[in-house]
Amino acid sequence: MSGRDEQQEQTIAKDLVVTKYKMGGEWEARCNMADRVLRTLVEASSSGVSVLSLCEKGLAMIMEETGKIFKKEKEMKKGIAFPTSISVNNFVCHFFPLKSSQDYILKEARTFVVDVAQGTRVTGRKADVIKTAHLCAEAALCLAKPRNQNTQVTEAWNKVAHSFNWMLIEGMLSHQLKQHDINGEKNIIQNPTDQQKKDQEKAEFEVREVYVVDVLVSSGEDPSKQYGLKMKTSRAFFSEVERRFDAMPFTLRAFEDEKAWMGVVECTKHGLLQPFNVLYEKEGEFVAQFKFAILLMPNGPMQITSGPFEPDLYKSEMKVQDAELKALLQSSASQETQKKKKKKKKASKTAENATSGETLKENEAGD
């Protein structure tokens, strides 16, 4: 979020950079900015609400929240790092409908986000897919630490998916993050393609690196399909992209004039833009995604984004079979339980102090 520094790379070795990555976690005890937006969208999701309206709400909230911070740093680039998207049922990722295209209206019990928002207990294939993705995310949290390798995470994900008999979306990447760069040098490949297996280089996690872990699991057996863009070239389009977004991802909805969208195809063809295609499975299949950012700090991984996920709501008959992986996940669950106890104890102590303060004021008033 800080301005460009040509002399020195901005890393989490600096406390200020850590603060910026955490995106204002100190402003509200419950969650940081990214999580607040996510929770707001989950709460707003109900039968009859359109996906487009939710996406626009997310973008507006991000712009509003980032506009409140670091106001004195005039040259700082801040705002949307990646456009809000809502993937429904068999959609995999990057779904943000345009006003001129068909919108999607949420329907009761058909979308994961509605199930979660209403606290409904989820069973069957939906629960299996979501539990698979959740356990993959937990495995990544345990393994993404200094001296471990990216391939260890890939192998663990494959074991989890095999235990639940589901497919990890082929070839998806979790990237290292750097300032102004969401596609860093190192990555973690999920269910690598044959070509990716040949090309992949083993990379070791190092202290003070930052990663976005992205897990995508499908109940289908077919590879994900792409929605293609069929538009003409426009030099003005790319000029506006450079001016407004620099190197960060954007949605075509950011351009009110649809004529400006004509430049997408030529810009993509010549490598000026990298498309984030909308992927989808066949109708009737389900897709679950867990995505979060972690900072590899000297005292261990720090997860700075999460989401309103409640594991107890998802009942699956499937279980992890691999003994080593099972032990790894159990250690993760134990650490999570300890964190919750500490938070609960801290909240209780805060409430106790507040009560004591009120009592003291009352006594002073009485005297």
Image (cartoon, rainbow, N blue to C red):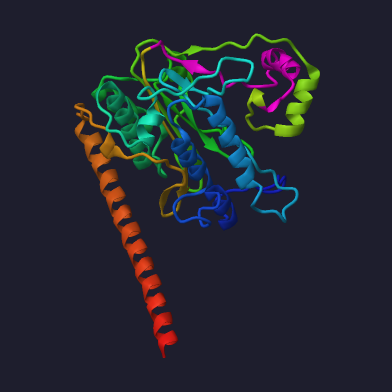
Q: Quadrant of the C terminus?
A: bottom left
Is residue 20 on the magenta stretch? no
Q: Is residue 153 left or right of residue 255?
A: left
Between 297 and 365, the one lying in front of the other is 365
- Residue stretch rendered in magenta on the structure: 254-283
Between 222 and 119, the one lying in front of the other is 119
**At 30% across and 20% down in the image, what residue appears?**
166
Q: Reply above or below: 361 against 291.
A: below
**At 49% across and 27% down in the image, what residue appears?**
49
Q: Would residue 9 be seen by someone viewing this image from the given angle?
A: no
Between 124 and 196, the one lying in front of the other is 124
Q: Would residue 107 be seen by someone viewing this image from the given angle?
A: yes
Is residue 274 on the magenta stretch? yes
Q: Is residue 161 left or right of residue 79?
A: left
Q: Quadrant of the N terminus?
A: top right
Residue 74 position in % (x across, y down): 75, 50
Most extreme residue toward the bottom, as rendered?
367
**At 75% across and 12% down in the image, what residue appears?**
233
Residue 224 position in % (x across, y down): 44, 14
Between 293 and 297, the one lying in front of the other is 293
Residue 283 position in % (x across, y down): 40, 11
